[in-house]
Image: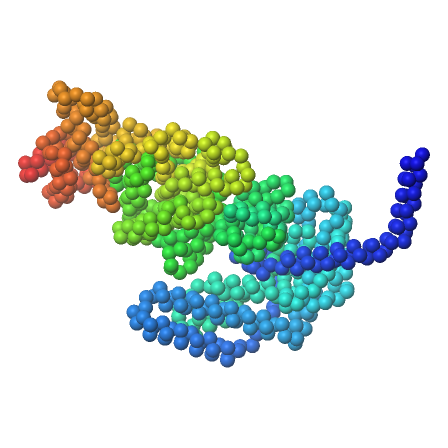
């Protein structure tokens, strides 16, 4: 019974406390709650709110015009001229690039000063009254767009209250605040929720309104619009007249052309950040692969979505991101700029120029993740993509729309093969994308200089994610390159893309996956690494005429360890691609360049990607070289060889010598076919292997100067007719006699 009396006493005491102290306690908690919410709302002020094409727009009342401040403009003009004269006096032969950089720097300073003066002007009391009179119009625009997101509805399923905060630069009329509160209540009543309505002021907004309901923010403040104006002015191209008057006139024109807008975005919170990975809270409507921006200005991409948190990789420097800081949803999937403007440039995986030249201005963007063409939209590979390398075009031909793997140990000429292929596309209307993943900056600079030297850079884009960049940048680099190449494919053109190399890409993906706490699988790689490379390489295809008729030819590069092509990543990519070119270390060390292993190299497209001329001439070449390699292996163990074996070995040595080729010297298809035909038919039997290079050069020169008709017949690529073949044999005999 004493337990019953104890319980009764406790209930009586609790009732007395509730009757007497409920109001003071309620006031204490309400006051504390108001302070906490005010502090949280203060942290939600995001100044970096501009995203090109990423916000919803609606016509708003124009801001009061700013009077022209001639004294300020004259000061900018004077400083501009002084800076220009100072630079010219320091270096009389200042380069155009240095002068351009100076102009860009001075323009940025002028833009910041103009926006600062405009902000100060609008904050003055006379103009403040004009801005305040427009707050009712701003409220109407916000209420027109006000709606509940799926994330808000999901939140209300577990909580019956949704927080609503109205922020303005000045105290608002009660009628206006009540109207906004009633609209929010009406919206929540439809789904069985109720608002927790807060009204606060923030003079830094200058004017306008900002309404937050749940995670969604509706912002039409003057401060936000001024920030947009500054970003718009900084993005404007340089005017043709690069003097002070021309630049300032262009800025004034930009201010006149600026359009007001209302931003609708969602906010979240950073829970933790380390090693380039951020854990986020909120953003209930976020999607996989979507872009977010942090308060410090850095951007990231969503790679992991869990019930309680979101995993995000940071593109830039994550050291600037603070825990519990706000993060903003951009509202679009990660994408890169695409177009002709990127050709001839070196860019990072986000499409930003890193070659020291002017800003790249494109008209179109494409998502870095995009579905591969379906089977009905594809057609078979039948048009050759000539590499200019005899050992490739004759033995393992590559067709437009094919995926051919280049595989081998380190320092066996994999990148050299790809660069020669790019150089050989000169004049063939084949744009090229070279994706450098995890390479040294000096290596990328050397590749760029070589492409410029041989005139290939004008139709090539280099996407560089060097070893010094973050794992997230290395991860998205090949997908960004694929998006750039797809622009040309879906425009009906043929494009070549090189991924150099996917081994480092797999390592970067493993790093991100382990940091996201994904379980590792075989050889410590995540189990979905196969899907990673398959969805990348499947985007290379040759489209049917109904789908546009363009193509993307992919040359992925994989680095092996000690020639082990049975390792995890090599076997993955081999099973995805349409063949592989295996470069052998022993052949490379013997001086065979390119060091193509005939036995392990294969093209699943085969002769369908060859001209009729090369198809006929090289039909027996693979078998003869394979026979030579097998006999050469046994011949090293004995010295007594019969005449037929010796003849096969000698012929194989000459053919291997004939297939050697210097770097940056691609050959047209007809020259390759002519040389292989001459060696295969025995016209080089008396030529020493060391003299094959001189024999080759003499052969090309003789046919171009002495046999123009036969040369023209070979250039057509058609199979040799009986008369053409007889003429070529006769010409080869005359060449032998003359030499």
Q: Which residue is at the front of the view, 41 or 524? A: 524
Residue 73 visible to an observer of this rendering:
yes
Give the farthest residue toward the bottom: 71
Q: Which residue is at the front of the view, 400 or 532? A: 532
Residue 81: where, in percent of width, then height? 40, 76
Residue 647: where, in percent of width, then height? 14, 24
Q: Quadrant of residue 671?
A: top left
Number of numbered markers: 0
Q: Which residue is located at x 31 percent, y 49 percent?
A: 447
Q: Which residue is at the front of the view, 45 or 405? A: 45
Q: As drawn, is 87 to the left or to the right of 187?
A: left
Give the farthest residue toward the left: 737
Residue 418 visible to an observer of this rendering:
no
Q: Which residue is at the front of the view, 641 or 176? A: 641
| Quadrant of the frame with the N terminus | top right
Q: Quadrant of residue 549?
A: top left
Q: As drawn, is 579 to the left or to the right of 180?
A: left
Q: Is residue 372 above or below residue 96?
A: above
Q: Which residue is located at x 19 percent, y 24 percent?
A: 636
Q: What colour-coding does the image apply?
A: rainbow
Give the farthest residue toward the front: 2
Q: Which residue is located at x 20 percent, y 32 percent?
A: 656
Q: Is residue 234 above or below residue 565?
A: below
Residue 310: where, in percent of width, then height? 59, 44
Q: Which residue is located at x 37 percent, y 32 percent?
A: 578
| Quadrant of the frame with the C terminus | top left
Residue 398: where, in percent of width, then height? 32, 36
């Amino acid at each position: 019974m004493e337990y019953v009396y104890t319980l009764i006493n406790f209930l009586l005491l609790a009732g007395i406390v509730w009757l007497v102290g409920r109001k003071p306690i309620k006031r204490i908690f309400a006051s504390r709650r108001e302070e906490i919410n005010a502090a949280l709302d203060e942290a939600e002020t995001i100044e970096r709110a501009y995203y090109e094409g990423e916000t919803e727009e609606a016509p708003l009342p124009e801001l009061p015009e700013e009077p022209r401040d001639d004294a300020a403009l004259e000061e900018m003009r004077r400083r501009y001229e002084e800076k220009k004269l100072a630079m010219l006096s320091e270096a009389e032969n200042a380069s155009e690039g240095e002068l351009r950089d100076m102009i860009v720097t001075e323009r940025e300073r002028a833009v910041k000063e103009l926006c600062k003066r405009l902000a100060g002007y609008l904050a003055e009391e006379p103009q403040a009254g004009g801005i305040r009179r427009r707050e009712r119009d701003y409220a109407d625009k916000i209420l027109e767009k006000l709606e509940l997101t799926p994330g808000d509805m999901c939140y209300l399923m577990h909580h019956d209250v949704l927080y609503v905060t109205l922020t303005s630069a000045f105290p608002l009329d009660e009628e206006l605040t009540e109207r906004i509160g009633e609209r929010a209540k009406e919206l929540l009543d439809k789904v069985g929720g109720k608002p927790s309505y807060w009204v606060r002021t923030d003079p830094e907004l200058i004017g306008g309104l900002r309404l937050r309901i749940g995670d969604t923010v509706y912002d039409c403040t003057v401060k936000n619009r001024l920030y947009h104006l500054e970003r718009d002015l900084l993005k404007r191209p340089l005017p043709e007249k690069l003097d002070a008057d021309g630049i300032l006139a262009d800025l004034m024109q930009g201010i006149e052309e600026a359009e007001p807008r209302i931003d609708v975005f969602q906010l979240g919170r950073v829970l933790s950040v380390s090693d380039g990975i951020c854990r986020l809270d909120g953003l209930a409507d976020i999607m996989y692969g979507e872009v977010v921006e942090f308060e410090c200005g850095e951007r990231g991409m969503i790679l992991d979505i869990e019930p309680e948190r979101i995993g995000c990789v940071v593109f830039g420097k994550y050291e600037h991101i603070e825990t519990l800081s706000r993060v903003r949803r951009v509202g679009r999937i990660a994408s890169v700029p695409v177009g002709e403007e990127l050709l001839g440039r070196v860019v990072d995986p986000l499409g930003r120029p890193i070659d020291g030249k002017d800003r790249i201005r494109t008209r179109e963007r494409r998502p870095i993740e995009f579905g591969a063409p379906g089977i009905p939209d594809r057609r078979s590979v039948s048009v050759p993509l000539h590499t200019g390398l005899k050992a490739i075009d004759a033995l393992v031909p590559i067709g437009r729309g094919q995926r051919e793997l280049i595989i081998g140990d380190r320092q066996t000429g994999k990148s050299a093969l790809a660069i020669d292929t790019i150089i050989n596309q000169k004049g063939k209307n084949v744009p090229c994308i070279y994706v450098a993943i995890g390479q040294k900056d000096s290596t990328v600079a050397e590749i760029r200089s070589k492409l410029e030297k041989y005139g290939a850079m004008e139709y090539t884009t280099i996407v560089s994610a060097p070893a010094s960049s973050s794992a997230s940048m290395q991860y998205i680099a090949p997908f960004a390159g694929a998006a750039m190449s797809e622009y040309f494919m879906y425009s009906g053109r043929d494009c070549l893309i090189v991924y150099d190399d996917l081994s480092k890409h797999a390592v970067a993906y493993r790093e991100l996956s382990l940091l996201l706490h994904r379980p590792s699988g075989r050889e410590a790689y995540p189990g979905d690494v196969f899907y990673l490379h398959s969805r990348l390489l499947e985007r290379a295809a040759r489209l049917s005429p109904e789908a546009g008729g363009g193509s993307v030819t992919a040359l992925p590069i994989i680095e092996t360890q000690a020639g082990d092509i049975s390792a995890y990543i090599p076997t993955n990519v081999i099973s995805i691609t349409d063949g592989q070119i295996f470069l052998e270390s022993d052949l490379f060390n013997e001086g065979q360049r390119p060091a193509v292993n005939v036995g392990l190299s294969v093209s699943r497209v085969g002769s369908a990607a060859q001209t009729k001329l090369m198809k006929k001439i090289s039909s027996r070449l693979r078998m003869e070289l394979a026979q030579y390699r097998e006999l050469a292996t046994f011949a090293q163990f004995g010295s007594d060889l019969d005449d037929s074996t010796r003849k096969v070995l000698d012929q194989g040595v000459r053919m291997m010598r004939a297939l050697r080729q210097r770097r940056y010297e691609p050959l047209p298809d007809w020259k390759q076919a002519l040389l292989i035909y001459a060696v295969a038919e025995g016209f080089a039997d008396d030529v020493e292997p060391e003299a094959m290079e001189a024999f080759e050069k003499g052969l090309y020169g003789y046919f171009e100067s002495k046999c123009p008709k036969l040369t023209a017949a070979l250039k057509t690529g058609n199979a040799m007719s009986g008369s053409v073949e007889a003429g070529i044999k006769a010409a080869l005999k005359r060449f032998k006699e003359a030499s």
